[in-house]
Amino acid sequence: MRALGRHVLAELYGCSFEVLNDIKKIEEIMVKAALEAGAEIREVCFHKFSPQGVSGVVVISESHLAIHTWPELGYAAVDVFTCGERVNPWDACRYLTEHFGAEEVKATEIARGIMEEPQRSMAANR
């Protein structure tokens, strides 16, 4: 595979209810995490759920950062996808872990890209 991007999927546990339920705080932390990683921000969109929880995305020139929170569980699911060599998704993940006060983090990096060898499409396998 020729990697075009790096996609970190992070599970953050033991986070503060107050932070995970505060849309303004989450937006601020997510934007700062993108900047900390050296990304260029394009768009920001967040939504507050009732009775609790926040979902949002920070669109960056290099791809995106996304989050969905379960404040009642102290849990946040985070994606940090970056393309190119300039932005390191782990820098953003470290920032998020620290500022959400996560007690535990499980994260996996997936290389995103195109196959070097021609592959049959799923439609061709029907």
Image (tube, helix red, strand yellow):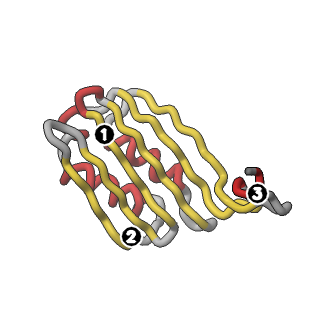
> In this figure, which residue is indicated by the disc labeled 3?
124
Q: Earlier in the sequence, mark 2 or mark 1?
A: 2
Q: Residue at x 46, y 67 (%)?
A: 39
Specify the amino acid type for callout 1. Thr
Q: Secondary structure at mark 2?
A: strand
Residue beneath label 1, please?
69
Q: CA distance from mark 3 to mark 1?
A: 39 Å
Looking at the picture, which amino acid does disc 3 mark? Ala
Q: Residue at x 23, y 40 (%)?
A: 53
Q: Position of residue 26 (x, y in %)?
A: 26, 49
Mark 3 nearby-residue class (10 Å; few <14, some 14–19, many ≥20): few
Residue 48 percent across, percent down from the top left: 19, 48
| Left or right, residue 56 beside residue 59 | left
Indicate whether 114 appears above or below 73.
Answer: below
State the residue position of label 2: 41
Q: Quick one: SS at disc 1?
A: strand
